[in-house]
Image (cartoon, rainbow, N blue to C red):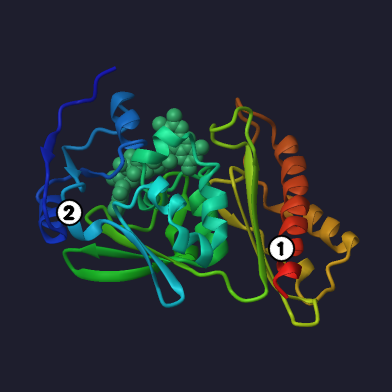
């Protein structure tokens, strides 16, 4: 199919892009186009204008600033995945990006585009929640920070205003004594997963669990923090039975109904398994960093 008619604009500054948005009733931002172009071609999306961000120099690049990774709106998935300094600062990012689609799509798609698009089955919004990141949104009224926990409202629906543009995302570096893991189950490699789980386990110097941050994609109308599982783990010495109990507790967060992919019951089983596997992997990595 072909997309509907739209005006095409190619601003060279954030200010120009924001001014362009304000001129239209509806507009879409073109980052990597890996979600927007299919949505246009399927006529799911029909904005009056498409505003291409690729000519805006200030939106490019990814860098470590102190204890935060700052990802520009036009930094491609693959660029972030392959950056060695970013890998050292937070290896969970590379591990998670390896599950996003295929390399050709990651060559074009952007991390910020994925966060702003807000697909409930997408991996990076789940990582964003688990790590406690934030985005900077700019609009005609100025700039504001939106914490990951405040961004997602519903499938493909965020708290961003229609006239706002995300200029960058911030993801904290991995804290000390912390292990990480992202695992998912998809029918074919590169597909959106039926469920995916992200785990960060931080240990006390004694080896007890100081804190756990767990999140999932594909199991509800937004990415979700698995707080019931986190509560089971915190303050314990992470015995196998505790880890298994966390897996069972996480099932309460599965609210996706049966659909043409699978059943809700199977998603619960998947989440239970993925939670126990990711905690086990993260725990081994945390212990190696003590
Ligand atoms: C075959 C295929 C398989 C895929 N599989 C997966 C997968 O397994 N997991 C996964 O997570 N993704 C998958 N994707 C999607 C891919 O990761 C996209 O790159 C990503 O979702 C969106 O990034 P983008 O840069 O392409 O955004 P675009 O498609 O350019 O934009 C997507 C949406 O975000 C908005 N947007 C973009 N940038 C900004 C910004 N700076 N501020 C505000 N709004 C903005 C746009 O207006 C648009 O509505 C797949 C895509 C394809 C084509």
Residue furthest toward the top?
1
What residue is pinned by disc 2? 56
Callout 1: 10 Å neighbours few (<14), some, many (20+)? some
Give residue 68's quadrant in the image.
bottom left
Residue 143: image location, x then y, percent: 25, 70
- Closest to the observer: 264 or 200? 200
Q: Residue at x 10, y 56 (%)?
A: 16
Give ligand 1's quarter of the image. Answer: top left
Task: Indicate left or right for 274 with 192 as reference.
Answer: right
Residue 8, placed above or below residue 209:
above
Give residue 231's quadrant in the image.
bottom right
Q: Which quadrant of the rendered structure holds the C terminus?
A: bottom right
Residue 128: image location, x then y, percent: 50, 59
Q: Residue at x 59, y 37 (%)?
A: 193
Of the numbered discs 2 and 1, the one sitting upstream in the chain is 2
Residue 95, placed above or below residue 1:
below
Task: Indicate left or right for 19 with 116 as reference.
Answer: left
Question: Tags 2 and 1 in contact by the CB under 8 Å rule?
Answer: no
Q: Residue at x 77, y 46 (%)?
A: 273
Q: CA distance from mark 2 to mark 1?
A: 39 Å
Badge number at residue 285: 1
Badge number at residue 75: none
Residue mark closest to the camera, 2 vs 1: 1
Residue furthest toward the bottom?
205
Is ligand 1 closer than 8 angstroms to the Cβ of mark 2? no
Q: Which quadrant of the rendered structure holds the N terminus?
A: top left
Is ligand 1 closer than 8 angstroms to the Cβ of mark 1? no
Residue 5: image location, x then y, percent: 15, 27
- Closest to the observer: 135 or 12? 12
Task: Indicate left or right for 185 with 57 as reference.
Answer: right
- Closest to the observer: 178 or 223? 178
Q: Secondary structure at mark 2?
A: loop
């Amino acid at each position: 199919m072909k997309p509907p008619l739209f005006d095409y604009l190619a601003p060279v500054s954030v200010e120009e892009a924001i001014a362009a948005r304000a001129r239209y009733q509806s507009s879409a931002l073109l980052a990597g186009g890996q979600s927007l172009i299919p949505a246009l071609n399927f006529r799911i999306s029909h904005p009056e204008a498409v505003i291409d961000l690729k000519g805006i120099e200030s939106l490019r690049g990814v860098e470590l600033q102190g204890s935060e990774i700052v990802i520009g709106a036009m930094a491609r998935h693959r660029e972030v995945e392959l950056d060695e300094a970013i890998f050292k600062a937070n290896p969970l990012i590379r591990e998670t990006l390896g599950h996003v689609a295929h390399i050709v799509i990651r060559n074009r798609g952007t991390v910020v585009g994925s966060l702003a698009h807000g697909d409930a089955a997408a991996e990076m919004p789940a990582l964003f929640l688990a790590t406690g990141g934030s985005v900077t949104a700019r609009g005609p009224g100025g700039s504001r920070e939106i914490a990951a926990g405040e961004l997602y409202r519903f499938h493909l629906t965020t708290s961003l205003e229609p006239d706002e543009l995300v200029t960058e995302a911030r993801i904290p570096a991995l804290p000390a004594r912390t292990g990480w893991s992202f695992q998912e189950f998809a029918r074919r490699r590169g597909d959106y997963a039926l469920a995916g789980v992200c785990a960060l386990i931080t240990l006390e110097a004694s080896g007890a669990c100081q804190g756990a941050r767990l999140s999932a994609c594909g199991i509800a109308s937004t990415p979700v923090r698995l707080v019931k599982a986190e509560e089971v783990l915190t303050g314990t010495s992470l015995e196998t039975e505790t880890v298994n109990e966390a897996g069972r507790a996480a099932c309460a967060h599965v609210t996706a109904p049966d659909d043409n992919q699978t059943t809700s019951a199977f998603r619960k089983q998947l989440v239970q398994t993925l939670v126990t596997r990711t905690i086990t992997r993260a725990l081994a990595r945390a212990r190696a960093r003590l």
